[in-house]
Image (cartoon, grey):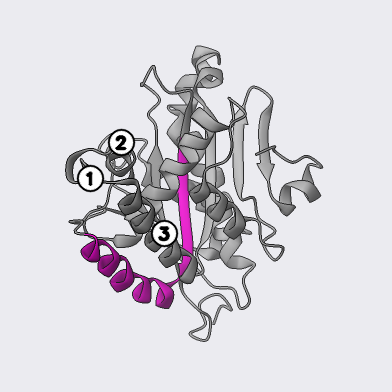
């Protein structure tokens, strides 16, 4: 029996959502954000997330874009209400001992590629998918004890079906990466209404996208929620990349793994 398939090892589950769209002229970056934790931890997380939303009168699924813009069910909310709910939701993610991973692609630099290369790569989403998936699997492989990851990606009609779908790329990525493949257990696409951890990934994706679009470029103070994800993602025990950025300079990473392999660290 394979070591990875042993029933003695924990099973991990990761959830992935995106922020931004490559065709949106207002966006500079496309971001994919993932959270990976033990399956048992997600089972405990689910009622905690639901309870936090119910206590504040929020109907599921929770959407961070609506929350941030005070739209729809958050219209008219006070700052006190916003701070209280956000604190509860982030605390639930922390208690699940989730590991955040981010993958960011510069849309501007992608659009500057030669047409033949753009056609081969197809979309910045697929560029972001590969390092994100690698680092989710790597994170689980470096836990003690390690274990395989069932990977759930938020359903996207443009990327989740048809030719050159995210699942097709995921399968190819597993075939061509034998060292990490044993930790890539399965690919599933899902809806936030059916998976509360996808709602948590939506929160993380929004913070990651906002950080690169609005905070990092302007040199503004890092938001509280992003700081909490950074603390989770930069623990000394984690040697995978917390965030990767692909731009005109190549692929740069933030985390101990990057410092070891590339000798560089992305400035937050």
For this orientation, the residue located farthest to the bottom is 8
| Quadrant location of the C terminus in the rendered image | top right
Q: Quadrant of the N terminus?
A: bottom right
Look at the image and tell me whether residue 188 can be seen.
Answer: no
Q: Is residue 174 in view?
A: yes
- In the rendered view, would you say 23 is above or below 204? above
Secondary structure type for disc 3 = helix
Residue 74: which numbered mark, if any? 1
Please, what secondary structure does the residue beneath circle 1 have?
helix
Going 69% across and 25% down the picture, which residue do you hit? 249
Distance CA(mark 2)–CA(mark 1):
8 Å
Mark 2 touches mark 1? (CB < 8 Å): yes
Crowding near the residue tagged with mark 2, few <14, some 14–19, many ≥20 C-alpha atoms within 10 Å: few
Name which quarter of the figure residue 197 lies in. Answer: bottom left
* Residue 69: assigned label: 2
Residue 187 lies, with reference to residue 97, above or below; the image says above
Mark 3 Cα-neighbour bin, 10 Å: few <14, some 14–19, many ≥20: some
Q: Which residue is mark 3?
A: 87
- Tally of marks: 3
- Mark 3 or mark 1: name the one nearer the start of the chain: 1
Q: Percent position (x, y) of residue 117?
A: 53, 20
Q: Position of residue 178 (x, y in %)?
A: 60, 57
**Magenta extent:** 31-56
């Amino acid at each position: 029996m394979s070591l990875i398939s042993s029933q003695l090892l924990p099973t991990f589950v990761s959830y992935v959502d995106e922020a931004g769209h490559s065709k949106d002229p207002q966006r500079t970056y496309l971001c994919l954000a993932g959270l990976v934790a033990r399956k048992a931890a997600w089972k405990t997380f689910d009622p905690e997330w639901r309870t936090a939303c119910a206590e504040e009168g929020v109907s599921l699924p929770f959407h961070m874009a609506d929350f941030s813009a005070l739209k729809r069910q958050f219209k008219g909310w006070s700052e006190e209400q916003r701070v209280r709910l956000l604190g509860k939701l982030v605390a639930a993610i922390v208690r699940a001992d989730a590991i955040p991973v981010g993958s960011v692609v510069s849309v501007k630099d992608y659009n500057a590629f030669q047409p033949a290369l753009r056609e081969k790569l197809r979309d910045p989403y697929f560029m972001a998918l590969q390092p994100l998936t690698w680092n989710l699997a790597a994170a689980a492989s470096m836990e003690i004890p390690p274990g395989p990851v069932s990977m759930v990606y938020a359903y996207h009609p443009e990327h989740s079906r048809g030719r050159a779908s995210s699942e097709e790329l995921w399968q190819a990525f597993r075939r061509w990466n034998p060292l990490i493949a044993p930790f890539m257990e399965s690919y599933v696409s899902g809806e936030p209404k059916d998976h509360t951890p996808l709602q948590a990934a939506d929160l993380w994706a929004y913070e990651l996208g906002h950080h690169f679009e609005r905070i990092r470029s302007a040199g503004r103070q890092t938001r509280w929620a992003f700081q909490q994800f950074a603390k989770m993602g930069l623990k000394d025990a984690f040697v995978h990349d917390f965030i990767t950025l692909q731009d005109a300079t190549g692929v740069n990473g933030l985390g101990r793994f990057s410092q070891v392999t590339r000798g560089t660290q992305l400035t937050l």
